Image (tube, rainbow, N blue to C red):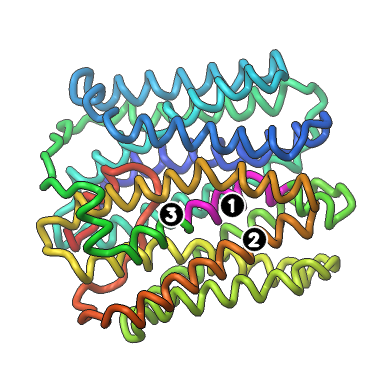
Amino acid sequence: MKKALIPLISLFIFVISNGFFMTFISLVLEKKGYSETVIGSMTAAFYAGLAIASLGIENIIAKVGHIRAFSAFVSGLAVVTMAQGFWINAGFWLVMRLAAGYFTAGLFVVVESWLLLLGTKQTRTKLLAIYMIAIYAAQAFGQLFINIQYKDPLLPYAVAAMLCSISVIPMAIMKLQAPSFDEPSRLNFLELFKLSASGVISCFCSGLILSGIYGLMPIFLLERLHHKVHDVSWLMSVVILGGMCLQYPIGRLSDYVERRFVLILICCLMAAMTIPLFFARQYFLLGVIMFSFGGLAFTIYPVAISLACDKLHVKHLTAAAQGLLLAYSIGCVIGPMLAATAMRFSKSYGYLGYFVMTNIGLAVFLAVRRVQQESVPQEEPFMPVPQTTPIAAELDPRG
């Protein structure tokens, strides 16, 4: 477990940069007067790059080695991050965010595959838990970098790029045999959908919801809090911490209560929370609501993974997890555009309405599936699963 500490430190530093910069660019574009559609498209481009890379980037790593690959991806990410500071242009930034998503996927694959080598079936549960905590804690901490008073407009871009560069240092001084990539069993997307339509659609809707939060929640909060950027950064941290704290207890509940029912309950609660969220303008009340809202939103994906696992043979779990991640990634690409469209036409009403429609739509679908299809024995326990790359599925001890 001690050997896992170094790649996790590199991951933590890099995710701080990523979490900070994702929120920062939304706030910059809003300040420059760009529409919600443009802001949403940046998030969509990032997830498109991540999805494209995660389907085959491990081949590059296998050829050049983990440390060289990590260094290359970090350098590329630092360059595209700084480049955005030199020229604020929507078309240029779209290309840069697509590239950033590609390099980010590469960094995740390096760390995840390294942890896979270090872990055994007995220790992967602990590794996966530490990995998830590192990601959420770093994302939450990264939001606080927005509060720094930058005297030069290029400094935020430089800070994000420097954090990326620093993250390579722990990996560069570590000496460890590179992990090999085992070929998982084949399970095409159509077969997966037939076996667990509820799991696939739930993962897709999770992508719709979480990308809408990452991409446009800062803009919504900025309007709620009368353009107090300091408070926005803290509340975005609270959203992510909610996901970290509530994911496991809600997930464990799904081990004892039928998972589709748990997902329906989550969706109904999220839809109901949009009412006080719309009227709340007091900082503390907003914080409580955002903590709960984030906690529920981040739980949908891992519960959906567990739901799908209940119907699959153990040899198919890794391949299925990759298919479910693809469904999530598609949702992440589409979600910001839909949320931005709703927000453009009706501001806060439209943005919150987007979450209501998505959650109610998923709840209705799952309710119909419960009537049409009996539940199966829940033999596989809940396991928090990262929505990063297909390699992360290998860390799941159920596979």
The quarter of the displayed image where residue 109 is located: top left
Please state which amino acid type lies under the numbered disc 2.
Answer: Val
Tell me the amino acid under the disc marked 1: Ala
Expressed as whole percent of the image width and height from the top left, the position of residue 278 reads 79, 66
- Provide residue 164's location: percent of width, then percent of height: 50, 28
Q: Say which residue appears at 55% left-offset and 27% top-offset.
A: 97
* Residue 140 numbered tag: 1
SS state under label 1:
helix
Relative to 118, residue 206 above or below: below
* The one of 127 and 173 positioned closer to us in this rendering: 127
| In the image: residue 110, left or right of residue 310 | right
Quarter of the image that includes the C terminus: bottom left
Q: Say whether marks 1 and 2 touch (CB < 8 Å).
A: yes
Q: Residues within 10 Å of mark 3 (few under 14, many from 20)?
A: many
Q: Where is residue 247 in the image (x, y as percent from the top left)?
A: 45, 68
The magenta segment is: 206-218
In this figure, which residue is indicated by the disc labeled 2? Answer: 238
